[in-house]
Amino acid sequence: TPLLGDGKVPSDAIAKEVVLLKRDARFGGLGAQLNSFFHAYDVAYDTGRPLYITQDAWVMDTLLPLFFGPSHEKNAKLWTTLEKVLRVKIVENEGVLQLMGIKVPNYQPPHSLFYTRTKKLDATQIRNHRETILRQLFQYPAMGSGIGENVCSTLQSLTADQNDKKYSVIHLAGKGQNAWLSKLNTVTGKDHTAATEMQPDYVKNILKQMDMLQHNIFPIDSDNDPINSEIIARLSKDPELAGHIRTDSKANHIGGKVYLAVLADVYLGNPVDQLSLWIARMRMALGKGGTFVLTEKRGDQWVSYVDATTHLELYDAQKLGLWMG
């Protein structure tokens, strides 16, 4: 099938109708764009059509800053590798499809894909697909030569002057994103206020459980929004956290932010932020523990209620609504 097949690139010979990602306006921030991208696979499965992507498609601007690098040479080797990793067919442009007699019924732009929900796949199938693709993509970290494009160099520079290599990341959402909190609480049936506010007591509660209170803490946010200075100031004034909060302009590039968070020993995410949920999915796909994004209080401790083995809470539309990846 287009979604859950054996890893073969779709064949031109059997494709009369396809699902297409092409040059178009991107929708939302990086997290929302990843939702739209992966939902295209669901459409492909539901309709029984293979997924095709043009070389200038909007999704290339989403993926390349994280994997391969935005300045990576656009050549046949890159397209072939992407085809194998993503299990799609990549064509030069939409005109190629017309010449081949391939049709694109009911084209869906990114904003439409974001709101699309599969009618045939369950949470387990969705998780298996997403995690397979993510694990393969992370074999090709962005290694460009431009500023912030080499994610490995960015991580090395962030920790170069630190003797302590263990660190935590706290993900702060902008005020506009926190306006969605009530909707998230309604669909999940849980109160995620603590994870959005990132009060010192919440952060310390989790870090103490993980024996990470004495290690560096890097705050990040999504896309190009500035760090929430009010939350940073509040955390920095706390006697137990003071001296451990680290801010650095090197972490302002989106690739650096994502990799810093994905590879952290502990990650405290903000569940109203689409990118934060994707970072949690990436960490779990790579077998990283210490992920706290969907949390609840049990007794005196804040804990993750995402099953550490199945992660299905992150892929269930009934439990996450618009936040389902």
Image (cartoon, rainbow, N blue to C red):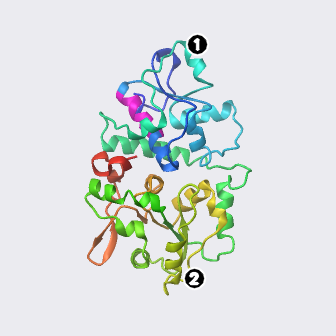
Q: CA distance from mark 2 to mark 1?
A: 62 Å
The residue sitting at 62% across, 31% down in the picture is 55
* Circle 2: residue type: Gly
Q: Say above or below: 38 vs 151.
A: above
- Predominant SS along the magenta part: helix
Quadrant in which the N terminus appears: top left
| 276 or 283, nearer to the observer | 276
Three-letter code for the amino acid on which mark 1 is drawn: Leu
Compared to residue 30, the image places residue 41 above or below, namely above
Q: Quadrant of residue 308?
A: bottom left
Could you say which quadrant of the image residue 92 lies in?
top right
Mark 2 — residue? 243
- Residue 221 shown left or right of residue 318 in the figure: right
Name the N-terminal-most of marks 2 and 1: 1
Q: Is residue 39 magenta?
A: yes
SS label for mark 2: loop
- Residue beneath label 1, please? 99
Q: Is residue 288 visible?
A: no
**Range of residues picked out in magenta:** 37-46
